[in-house]
Amino acid sequence: MYRIDLAPEARDDLKALRKHEEVEVVAATRAQLAHEPTTETRNRKRRRPNPVAEWELRAGDLRVLYNVDEGAGMVHVEAIGRKVGNLLVLAGRRGPQ
């Protein structure tokens, strides 16, 4: 079982969401990333190389960007954003594609 750690930026992103969205993201993160976070599924995929995170979890139109440290058994959530068309919006700022 992996432990889940939120970066300070991800905490800010989470606070910027509406309450029901926050609950949805937390539930999806716990359910999807506690076990086998590096297994690609319909809602989890490896991202193209970018400066933020290697992996993406989809929860509706919300996205959780994360990295995995398998040796430490940790999932590091780097950012949480909203997919708008082909753009990812992170707490009002445009994120990596």
Image (cartoon, rainbow, N blue to C red):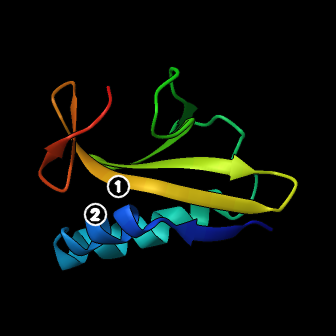
- Report the disc number at residue 94: none
Residue 6 place in picture, x, y as percent? 50, 68
- Which residue in the protein does label 1 denote? 80
Q: Residues within 10 Å of mark 2 (few under 14, many from 20)?
A: many
- Tell me if label 2 and label 1 are in contact, CB under 8 Å: yes
Per the image, label 1 sits on a secondary structure element best described as: strand
Residue drawn at x 44%, y 71% is: 26
- Image-quadrant location for residue 54: top right
- Which residue in the protein does label 2 denote? 13
The answer to whether 94 appears left or right of 72 in the picture is left
Residue drawn at x 56%, y 39% is: 55
Residue 30 place in picture, x, y as percent? 57, 69
Q: Residues within 10 Å of mark 1 (few under 14, many from 20)?
A: many
The answer to whether 62 appears left or right of 40 in the picture is left
- Kind of residue sitting beneath label 1: Ile
Per the image, label 2 sits on a secondary structure element best described as: helix
Residue drawn at x 32%, y 31% is: 96
Q: In what quadrant of the picture does the N terminus appear?
A: bottom right
Residue 10 place in picture, x, y as percent? 38, 63
The answer to whether 27 appears left or right of 3 in the picture is left
- Image-quadrant location for residue 41: top right
Marks 2 and 1, Cα distance to the nearest angstrom?
6 Å
- Of the pair 40 and 89, the residue shown nearer to us: 89
- Image-quadrant location for residue 19: bottom left
Q: In what quadrant of the picture does the C terminus appear?
A: top left
| Comes first in the chain, label 2 or label 1 | 2
- Of the pair 54 and 45, the residue shown nearer to us: 54
Asked if 60 appears above or below 2 in the picture, the reply is: above
- Kind of residue sitting beneath label 2: Asp
